[in-house]
Image: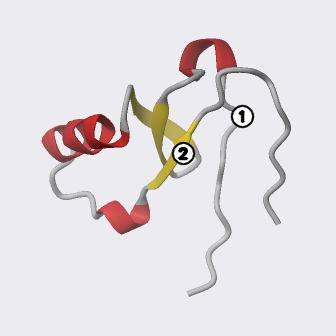
Amino acid sequence: MNMKLKIPTIDIKKYGGKEVAILNGKVIFAGKSLPDVIKILKKKMPAQPLREVTFLRVPESLMVIYHV
C-alpha cells in the first residue's frame, strides 16, 4: 500500500519534546512518551487501528525535516 502521509504543521512551543499521534492530518494526542500516547489512544479511541495512526517525536527546537 502506497499511502501519502498527511503531516500537519506542528507547533514546537506546544508539542516540543513530546510524542504525538497524528490521524487524518491532525494531532489527536500528545504525551511524554510513545507508550503514554498509545495508552491514551487506546482508552479514548479503542476501535482505532494503530496502523492508521502516525506517531512522531517532535524536536525540542526548531529544525527542518524533509520527508520524501
- For label 1, the crowd category at 10 Å Cα-Cα, with few meaning under 14, some 14 to 19 and many 20 or more, is few
Q: Quadrant of the N terminus?
A: bottom right
In which quarter of the view is residue 57 placed? Answer: top right
Quadrant holding the C terminus: bottom right
What is the spatial separation of the Cα atoms under label 1 and label 2, in whole angstroms?
A: 12 Å
Q: Is residue 27 above or below residue 49?
A: above
The residue lying furthest to the bottom in this view is: 1
| Residue pointed to by mark 1 | 9
For mark 1, give the secondary structure.
loop
Q: Position of residue 7 (x, y in %)?
A: 66, 48
Of labels 1 and 2, earlier in sequence is 1
Q: What amino acid is found at the position of numbered circle 1 in the picture?
A: Thr
Residue 25, position in %: x, y? Answer: 59, 47
In the image, residue 1 sits, relative to residue 65, either above or below, namely below
Q: Amino acid at mark 2?
A: Leu
The residue tagged 2 is 56
Quarter of the image for residue 16 reads top right
Q: Nearer the viewer, mark 1 or mark 2?
A: 2
Q: Is residue 1 left or right of residue 62?
A: left
Camera-nearest residue between 22 and 34: 34
61, above or below 45, in the image? above
Residue 29 is left or right of residue 36, and the answer is: right
Q: Residues within 10 Å of mark 2 (few under 14, many from 20)?
A: some
The x, y position of residue 9, in whole percent, is 71, 34
8 and 35: which one is in front? 35
Mark 1–mark 2 CB contact (< 8 Å): no
